[in-house]
Amino acid sequence: MTQDVKEIFGGPGGSLAAKVRTLAPSMTRSMQRVAEAVASDPAGCAALTVTGLAELTGTSEATVVRTARLLGYPGYRDLRLALAGLAAQQQSGRAPAITTDIAVDDPIADVVTKLAYEEQQTLADTAAGLDTVQLGAAVNALAGARRTDVYGVGASGLVAQDLTQKLLRIGLIAHAHSDPHLAVTNAVQLRSGDVAIAITHSGSTGDVIEPLRVAFEHGATTVAITGRPDSPVTQYADHVLTTSTSRESELRPAAMSSRTSQLLVVDCLFVGVAQRTYETAAPALAASYEALAHRHRTSPR
Amino acid sequence: MTQDVKEIFGGPGGSLAAKVRTLAPSMTRSMQRVAEAVASDPAGCAALTVTGLAELTGTSEATVVRTARLLGYPGYRDLRLALAGLAAQQQSGRAPAITTDIAVDDPIADVVTKLAYEEQQTLADTAAGLDTVQLGAAVNALAGARRTDVYGVGASGLVAQDLTQKLLRIGLIAHAHSDPHLAVTNAVQLRSGDVAIAITHSGSTGDVIEPLRVAFEHGATTVAITGRPDSPVTQYADHVLTTSTSRESELRPAAMSSRTSQLLVVDCLFVGVAQRTYETAAPALAASYEALAHRHRTSPR
DNA sequence: GTCACAAGTGAAAGATATTTTCGGTTCGGT
DNA sequence: ACCGAACCGAAAATATCTTTCACTTGTGAC
């Protein structure tokens, strides 16, 4: 049957070319041709059947099989498998090393790779820089809040809405405000035991700072999610959650990475709160899922 | 005959596990068993024949072949070769994966780590599974569109808004609709040269499918961003962009990773369009940045 | 509930690929 | 030139993969 996998991949002599050179002298002419084809283009040969390789090298199937045997495999099938592995290794050997910014003339495939890479980087940075003590405090405040107001405008406004949607799903009372006037109007209603959260990358967006200040002065617990821990918004924040500020390029505005970062923080808040209020959160989540089921057409499978 | 090697190794879809996760929902039970065996132990499966794998998974040869086809290979033989390659790659460099789900009693620091890791995973999967041809086509349509409508409800609605905001920033005309009635009303206005984009993870959200259908029938170029490439929404989509479907746990609803995935796709669309319309996009971006400057308070002291 | 129909599944037939067999060919030595 | 042994490839034999088809299971309609 088939040789043990360990033998094929783990073996000591990773280099097939070396084996070919060692054994070449003891090979017949036809076999050498096959061996050389295999050594010079593993990937290409891996795509061929015995017959194909035999034709390519101008030999016969039998010779191909004999060569495979000589190289230490039970048959051509296994040699082919090993070849596929070798080809893959060679492929992956070329380190990706994505350093360059996205350029105007980058092909679309590169854009995808680079964007994904940069967002991954942003996530790692954010996770590394997040103060878990502050996060824990914010979670506690949220879990016990009578109501929660979230402020954010522009791109941060969407993050505010995302947080709100999530909190609503686990049975908490939350509102997102992107209208600064309404936000202030509502902030006046807040008092001790309530929570206000401001989301702003720059930390100096007046429209968001103002309602947070009002909430702060009315005794609410205030949280700031910002990329600038030294910015004005932190003056009125009991807890500051720092998002990462990654370099931006012309084609990749800061808003993109700040959003990724903010969303991770928001997700952490959500999961933290869900943990603390598990008794009510779990059934609430299940219920909201159920409620949405009938909005979906039945799918083909 | 045998699939081109380039396809197997070099192709865009590097990660098999990602493909399995993306396609798992559209698989039948038996096929899922096969897919999982393959994803969890590529090396082991590479050593098995169709019959062997069928026995291992308690299914039949036919099912194994069907699964291989679904994963994008012409047959089992080619899947097996790819598997061998994958196994070899794993042999060489392996990163320690964080496997456990988030538990109710996880400390907050673990939550941060795990969430960041899972979102990174989601990004990698999405990038690996994105069809750059479809993406390029969608970008071209957007870049030349008279106007663009984007449909999304719930969590996807926020993504729709995000895309809209971005497109507006580079001078395109775009609208996001979360109200299904208004969406349909507006879709009627679309015609050839316009673009309609539907964002839905399940691909079966009627409120989003309906406006896309109308847009489609009125001759607009339609794009679907969905996690289910076989879902109803794709019927009316000229271009389908697939987001990744990662496993979800009780504390981490699917909405979380689908949002991450959708946002990456949206970012790719945006950057792609910005590239194509660079002449107008660059100054527009700069202008919108300028316009916002005065909304920011000067930093303290 | 139960009926009809579609989707899913595996046993087995059919098609391909691999391995083995075996007879012809080449080549060095005499 | 002749002999023998190693070499080689065509074709048979076997193993593996793919397709077909009938049976089962699940699902929606009535």
Image (cartoon, coloured by chain):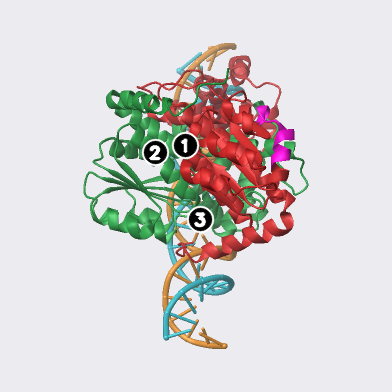
Chain colours: A red, B green, C orange, D cyan
Same chain letter for marks 1 and 2? no
Instruction: Please report contact status of discs 1 and 2: CB closer than 8 Å, yes or no.
Output: yes
Indicate the amino acid at tag 1. Answer: Ala
Crowding at dot 2, Cα within 10 Å, few <14 / some 14-19 / many 20+, comes out as some
Q: Chain of mark 2?
A: B
Image spot of residue B70 (x, y percent): 49, 50
Residue shown at 38% from the left, 38% from the top: B135
The residue wearing badge 2 is B165
Q: Quadrant of the N terminus of chain A?
A: top right
Is A84 magenta? The answer is no
Instruction: Please report contact status of discs 2 and 3: CB closer than 8 Å, yes or no.
Output: no
Indicate the amino acid at tag 2. Answer: Gln
The answer to whether B116 is drawn above or below residue A58 in the figure is: below
Q: Which residues are magenta?
A: A127-138
B17 sits to left or right of B174: right
Same chain letter for marks 3 and 1? no
Q: Secondary structure at mark 1?
A: helix
Displayed quadrant of residue B166: top left
Image spot of residue A227 (x, y percent): 57, 27
Residue shown at 70% from the left, 26% from the top: A11
B94 sits to left or right of B183: right
Image spot of residue A24 (x, y percent): 58, 16
State the CA–CA distance, disc 3 to disc 1: 34 Å
The answer to whether B12 is drawn above or below residue B190 in the figure is: above
Numbered badge on residue B26: 3
Q: Secondary structure at mark 2?
A: helix
Same chain letter for marks 2 and 3? yes
Instruction: Please report contact status of discs 3 and 1: CB closer than 8 Å, yes or no.
Output: no
The residue wearing badge 1 is A155
Counting residues from the N terminus, which is met first, the one under dot 2 or under dot 3? 3
Give the foreground label among 3 and 1.
Answer: 1
Q: Chain of mark 3?
A: B
